[in-house]
Amino acid sequence: MKLFNLINKFKSDEDGAVTVDWVVLTAAIVGLGIAVLTSVSGGTTSLADKISSELSSMTILTH
């Protein structure tokens, strides 16, 4: 009888399940962030290079 009560108590305890849910949710958010950074980084690098070369070619006029 004690074993049956212990098994039922273990099945109804949801503390660990909530932790697993948060770990999975956090991993999904981190994965999505990495995917976005990977896909955007090529374009931002190209744009930064264009801006850098444009600024380097400019001259400052003094009076």
Image (tube, grey):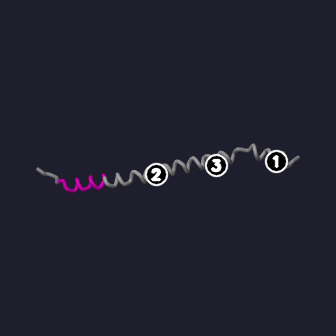
Q: Position of residue 9 (x, y in %)?
A: 78, 45
Looking at the image, is mark 1 or mark 2 nearer the viewer?
Answer: 2
Residue at x 52% of width, y 48% of height: 29
Which comes before the other along the chain, label 1 or label 2? 1
In screen coordinates, is 9 left or right of 16? Answer: right
Residue at x 56% of width, y 48% of height: 26
Residue at x 82% of width, y 47% of height: 6
Q: Amino acid at mark 2?
A: Ala
Q: How many neighbours does mark 1 have within 10 angstroms: few (below 14), some (14-19), or many (20 or more)?
A: few
Q: Amino acid at mark 1?
A: Leu
Q: Pointer 3: what residue?
A: 20
Kind of element beneath mark 1 = helix
Q: Position of residue 31 (x, y in %)?
A: 51, 51
Marks 1,3: beta carbons within 8 A = no
In screen coordinates, is 26 left or right of 53? Answer: right
Q: Is residue 27 magenta?
A: no
In screen coordinates, is 7 left or right of 32? Answer: right
Front-most of residues 49 and 39 = 39
Q: Which secondary structure class fits the magenta region best?
A: helix
Q: Pointer 2: what residue?
A: 35
| Start-end of magenta stretch | 47-58
Q: Pointer 1: what residue?
A: 6
Q: Position of residue 44 (x, y in %)?
A: 35, 52
